[in-house]
Image: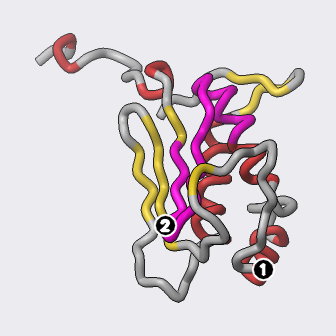
């Protein structure tokens, strides 16, 4: 994944790194560790998606405007906050929306159910190959 030039206010940031940090932290902080379902983070050409077991409080896509955060693993979340990998409850979803819009121009999907899914759409520029192509290399 390319690290596109993105600014937040007057400062250049890595939206890619911020998205991945939030998504990976979410995999650990909100996982249902009593379930043997294997947590996944998959990077494809047009999207990143995660899946992990979940103690669901509802089903379907979450709306960031009406979302009510619920701590699923308070001790794990507390450790993540202490080491700087998490902020306040619910900020991960808001920040993932913010940085995904800056990075790929689209909105992520958060879907709650027995398996919690996050889908981060990727724009062609975010995954384009940079540098010489295989056909232009000299033998």
Q: Residue 42 appears at what percent x and percent y?
A: 40, 51
**Label of residue 112 in the image:** none
Query: Closer to us: mark 1 or mark 2?
Result: 2
> Of residues 17 and 51, which is closer to you in this image?
51
Q: Please give the name of the residue rendered at 80% of the width and 43% of the height, measured from the top-left corner.
A: 65
Q: Is residue 104 above or below residue 133?
A: below
- Determine whether the residue tagged by mark 2 lies in a helix, strand or loop: strand
Q: Residue 96 appears at what percent x and percent y?
A: 69, 44
Q: Residues within 10 Å of mark 2 (few under 14, many from 20)?
A: some
> Of residues 92 and 126, which is closer to you in this image?
92
**Label of residue 74 in the image:** 1
Q: Residue 11 appears at what percent x and percent y?
A: 84, 26
Q: Say whether residue 132 is left or right of residue 66.
A: left
Q: Residues within 10 Å of mark 1 (few under 14, many from 20)?
A: few
Distance, label 1 to label 2, CA atoms, is 19 Å
Q: Is residue 113 magenta?
A: yes
Task: Point out the image quarter for the C terminus.
Answer: top left
Residue highlighted by disc 2: 115
Q: Work out which residue is located at the far bottom of the displayed protein and give it.
A: 34
Count of all numbered marks drawn on residues in the image: 2
Q: Please give the name of the residue rendered at 77% of the width and 69% of the height, measured from the top-left corner.
A: 70
> Of residues 130 and 94, which is closer to you in this image?
94
Q: Please give the name of the residue rendered at 50% of the width and 73% of the height, measured from the top-left corner.
A: 53
Q: Please give the name of the residue rendered at 20% of the width and 16% of the height, measured from the top-left corner.
A: 137
Q: Work out which residue is located at the far top of the displayed protein and give it.
A: 136
Residues at badges 1 and 2 in contact (C-beta under 8 Å)?
no
The image quadrant of residue 4 is top right
Q: Is residue 43 above or below residue 5?
A: below
Sequence-earlier tag: 1 or 2: 1
- Determine whether the residue tagged by mark 1 lies in a helix, strand or loop: helix
Q: Is residue 63 above or below residue 41?
A: above
Q: What is the magenta range?
A: 97-119
């Amino acid at each position: 994944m390319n690290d596109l030039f993105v600014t937040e206010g007057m400062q250049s940031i890595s939206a890619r790194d911020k998205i991945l940090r939030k998504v990976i932290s979410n995999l650990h902080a909100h996982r249902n560790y009593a379930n043997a379902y294997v947590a996944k983070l998959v990077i494809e050409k047009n999207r990143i998606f995660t899946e992990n077991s979940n103690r669901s409080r509802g089903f379907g896509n979450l709306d960031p405007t009406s979302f009510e955060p619920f701590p699923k693993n308070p001790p794990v979340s507390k450790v993540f906050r202490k080491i700087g990998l998490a902020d306040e409850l619910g900020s991960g979803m808001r920040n993932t929306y913010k940085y995904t819009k800056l990075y790929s121009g689209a909105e992520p999907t958060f879907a709650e159910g027995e398996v919690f899914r996050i889908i981060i759409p990727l724009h062609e520029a975010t995954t384009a190959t940079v540098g010489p192509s295989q056909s232009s290399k000299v033998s």
